[in-house]
Image (cartoon, rainbow, N blue to C red):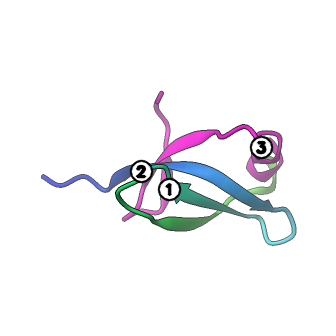
């Protein structure tokens, strides 16, 4: 069974539209994804924008998978 999970790095946070942009960290492929989040999560993400924080993201469901990297 093929998985839709990939590791993405947080690249940009837009507080006004409450979206966050992520990009893959793999050198062999380049993919970007934009996700809508609630205000509290956007505020949380904004603190990590320059720290290279990464998340597992299900690219089919377009949601963050809560598990340790």
Find the residue positioned furthest to the bottom: 17
* Horizontal arrangement in the rendering, residue 5 relative to residue 7 (left or right): left
Q: Earlier in the sequence, mark 2 or mark 3?
A: 2
The residue that mark 3 highlights is 50
The residue that mark 2 highlights is 26
Find the residue positioned furthest to the top: 68
Q: Residue 41's spot in the image, x, y percent? A: 74, 47
- Distance from Cα at disc 1 to Cα at disc 2: 19 Å
Circle 3 or circle 1, nearest the eye: 3
Q: Circle 2 sits in a helix, a strand or a loop, which is it? A: loop
Q: Residue 25's spot in the image, x, y percent? A: 48, 49
Q: Earlier in the sequence, mark 3 or mark 1?
A: 3
Q: Residue 65's spot in the image, x, y percent? A: 46, 44
Structural crowding at the residue carrying mark 1, measured as other residues with C-alpha within 10 Å and reported as few (<14), some (14–19) or many (≥20):
some
Q: Which residues are magenta?
A: 41-69
Q: Residue at x 81, y 47 (%)?
A: 46
- Distance from Cα at disc 2 to Cα at disc 3: 18 Å
Q: Residue 26's spot in the image, x, y percent? A: 41, 50
Q: Residue at x 25, y 52 (%)?
A: 3
The residue that mark 1 highlights is 63
Q: Earlier in the sequence, mark 1 or mark 2?
A: 2
* Horizontal arrangement in the rendering, residue 8 relative to residue 39 (left or right): left
């Amino acid at each position: 069974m093929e998985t839709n999970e990939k590791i993405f790095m947080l690249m940009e946070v837009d507080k006004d539209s409450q979206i966050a942009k992520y990009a893959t960290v793999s050198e062999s492929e380049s993919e970007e994804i934009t996700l809508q989040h609630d205000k509290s999560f956007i505020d949380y993400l904004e603190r990590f924008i320059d720290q290279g924080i990464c998340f597992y993201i299900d690219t089919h469901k377009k949601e963050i998978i809560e598990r340790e990297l």
